[in-house]
Amino acid sequence: MSVKSPSYRPLTCLCVFCLMNLCVAQNGITQMTEPGFSDLETLSGDTTCPYGSASCLPCVADVLAQINDLKTEEDDSGEFNFRNKANGINFSLLKHAQGIARIPGCGSENVFVITRHHTTRTAGNGIISIVFPEVQSGGDGFMGSGIDKSNSGEIVQLFSTNDNRHPGGCQIIGQTLLVTHESGVRDMKDKSWISFYDVSNPADMRETSRLYMDGTDILGQTYPLTPAGQADAVGIAKLEDGRYLLLAMESRRRMKNDVAWFFVSTTNDLNNTEWEFRQFWQQTELIPGRKDWRVYENINLVTNCNDGQIYLLGFHGVGRNNYLDVFSLNLDLKDRIIV
């Protein structure tokens, strides 16, 4: 199968205002008061993380400029293929791959993880790790290594469990992979959760913990759930004070009102923490008439080196074209995040 470099549409969407401190009760979503972010003076990301760290991601120098400088023509893209059958694993992308990430500081910077969904559990829902032996990127882009095409990809491991139907969007931070999951069981209380995987060894990926989206956090604080009760995508960033900001998002196509949940870790140790709910956000909070928001099944949070600004990258597709939209995250006077 092929892993192709996407075509990007640079788009910068900045600061929209929300002056409400309560979630609006609509479409089955319960009204409630939010804790907010009063313990943070600013919503700044960590800018000190070195590349290859096991617990954080390095900042990006001038995020907006780099995105606007991306080459998006077909001649600027590469194609990297991997075999469906390798190491005793028979894996097909018959339905679709949901998310993709590279493991930093692993091998010769040539190892990817892909989340994959199929309509039947026996078809191999789960996460696969793939290595491209021909590529020696040193942390740069694959095409920066002098190769724009490779057929050397081999599946290293398929990680799958019996209690999920739909592994979804993902983000990697250091050598920890976050993936959204749906239970696929109608009467199950925990319809959705975020799994944390240790991917430091791509041949032996392990699930280390879960954040269940069940409407109550570790402190007993309640937060609203949608009728579907599912998270489709997840993003994470390390904050300036050492804690982590986590964003889970649900795409509600029919209602045209995507929603998001913000959490903050209780410790600075990603492998030993609980998660506090801080804010519920709805697409209806965007500036009236604004149409920049799309249906995002993959998101990432990245930090700007210059000032610690955290950006939300939203990935979506139309037909055979893939797009990238960029939003800034900031705090308003009510200590809420504005997107």
Image: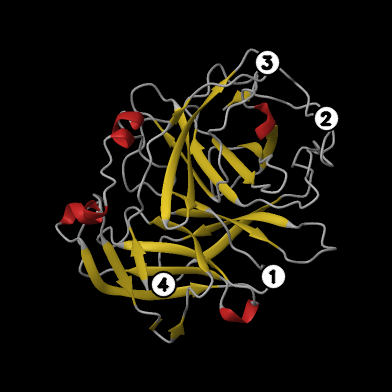
Q: Hey, what amino acid is under mark 1? A: Asp
The residue shown at (28%, 58%) is 109
Q: In the figure, residue 224 lies in which quadrant?
A: top right
Dot 3 falls on a residue whose secondary structure is loop
Q: Disc 3 or 4, which lies upstream in sequence?
A: 4
Q: Quadrant of the N terminus?
A: bottom left
**313 vs 199, nearest the viewer:** 313
Residue, disc 4: 203
Q: Position of residue 2 (x, y in %)?
A: 35, 69
**282 vs 22, nearest the viewer:** 282
- The residues bearing labels 1 and 2 have C-alpha atoms spaced at a distance of 31 Å
Tell me, for residue 207, which label it has, or none.
none
Residue, disc 2: 32
Q: Hey, what amino acid is under mark 2? A: Met
Furthest residue toward bottom: 88
Does 309 sit above or below residue 19? Answer: below
